[in-house]
Image: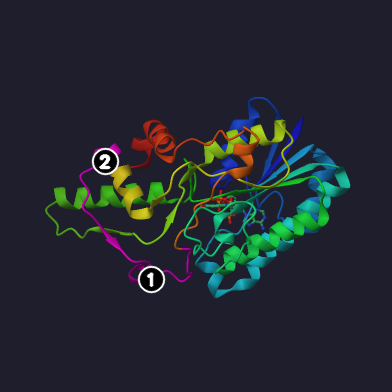
Amino acid sequence: MKILITGSRGQLGSDLVKYFTTDFEVLGVDIKEMDVTDPAEVSETFDSFRPDIVLHAAAYTDVDGAEADTEPVMKVNAEGTAHIAQSCKEHGARMVYYSTDYVFDGRKGAPYMESDVPFPINEYGRSKLEGEKRVAEILDNFTVLRTAWLYGAYGKNFVRAVIRRGWQQIRAKHDGQIVTSVKVVNDQAGNPTWTMEVARQTRVVIENNLRGIIHATAEGETTWYDFAKEIFEYLKMPVYISPCSSEEYGSAAVRPANSSLENVVLKKAGLNVMRDYKAALFEFLSQTGELTE
Ligand SMILES: NC(=O)c1ccc[n+]([C@@H]2O[C@H](COP(=O)([O-])OP(=O)(O)OC[C@H]3O[C@@H](n4cnc5c(N)ncnc54)[C@H](OP(=O)(O)O)[C@@H]3O)[C@@H](O)[C@H]2O)c1
């Protein structure tokens, strides 16, 4: 079984490569080896590697940057995804496209199911939804795996960023400087999900040939503020943090107030291997906590 993994230097792509390499023939490619917006490069990669399965984790993920200039985000997340789907069709490869909780507006007041109608409220969400549509138009045999609030050992993510800010504050306090609290948004809720859990769930999905739209997030929801508190408590870091509103934080992109997902399809099939977010977080921190300092 040959697996092509796009976005292989990103957070999720790195863990997908690490996880699948043990049992499969894997080719990981990122923008330098194969720019998904270039159909010729995509074709060449498929022709030479001839994948059976494609895990498409490459994406334009700068949610705030996407608001300023909508062209690149659509080009990568919609058109680039269509190029991958087209090559999958030509080669008879099975495609898994990673999508996001940001396809929803966050106003439902309960976790979103796969049957809920998406309504994105920012450019990133619109581009990922457009990617989903292109995949479904081009392929019969596809999986859209919607996940959320990803963190892992590689790349930029909330867990690593908040630990870094915590250590900055602890050092400043130690050096006798005036410290400011770490401000964390408290009016957005979701399911923080470890990339390694998504890799494990992806394998279960592939091996059981699950198709269509599938939600795959950690169990349980929290806010960014409570999540930060849990991280500092687990690491026993004496950090002074305070909650703030999204408006006060002032990001360029508006984000859903509560974009929690329910893994309905996985649970109905008896194939949900996503754990509670705290269990996954604590395992992640026990492995990498001190490295993220
Ligand atoms: N992060 C989250 O919280 C989250 C939540 C839900 C769903 N997702 C989805 O999960 C997937 C993985 O996310 P992630 O957090 O691992 O993203 P990431 O860390 O930003 O990784 C994405 C990778 O794709 C690469 N890339 C960008 N443009 C490309 C292009 N034109 N051709 C080829 N590669 C390109 C990026 O390279 P550069 O770094 O050089 O741009 C990066 O290495 C994405 O589909 C994302 O939409 C993410």
Q: Name the residue beneath numbered marker 1.
A: 250
Q: Name the residue beneath numbered marker 2.
A: 233
Residue 276, quarter of the rendered image: top left
| Count of labels in the image | 2
SS assignment for the magenta stretch, majority = loop
User: Observer-nearest residue: 35 or 120?
Assistant: 120
Q: Is residue 108 magenta?
A: no
Question: Residue placed farthest to the top in the image?
Answer: 23
Amino acid under disc 2: Glu
Residue 177, quarter of the rendered image: bottom left
Left/right placement of residue 29 relative to residue 230 reads right
User: Observer-nearest residue: 33 or 36?
Assistant: 36
Mark nearer the N terminus (2 vs 1): 2
In the rendered image, the quadrant that contains the N terminus is top right
Amino acid under disc 1: Gly
Q: Residue at 60% across / 36% down in the picture?
A: 201
Question: Residue placed farthest to the left in the image?
Answer: 176
Report if residue 76 is visible in the image. Answer: no
Do tag 2 and tag 1 residues touch (Cβ < 8 Å)?
no
SS under mark 1: loop
Q: Is residue 236 magenta?
A: yes
Left/right placement of residue 241 relative to residue 2 reads left
Magenta residue span: 234-256
Reply above or below: 175 against 219: below
Query: Residue 77: x and y, percent?
Result: 66, 60
Find residue 197 and name its label.
none
Q: Residue at 23% across / 52% down in the picture?
A: 169
Label 2 packing within 10 angstroms: few (<14), some (14-19), many (20+): few
In the rendered image, the quadrant that contains the C terminus is top left
Left/right placement of residue 82 relative to residue 153 reads right
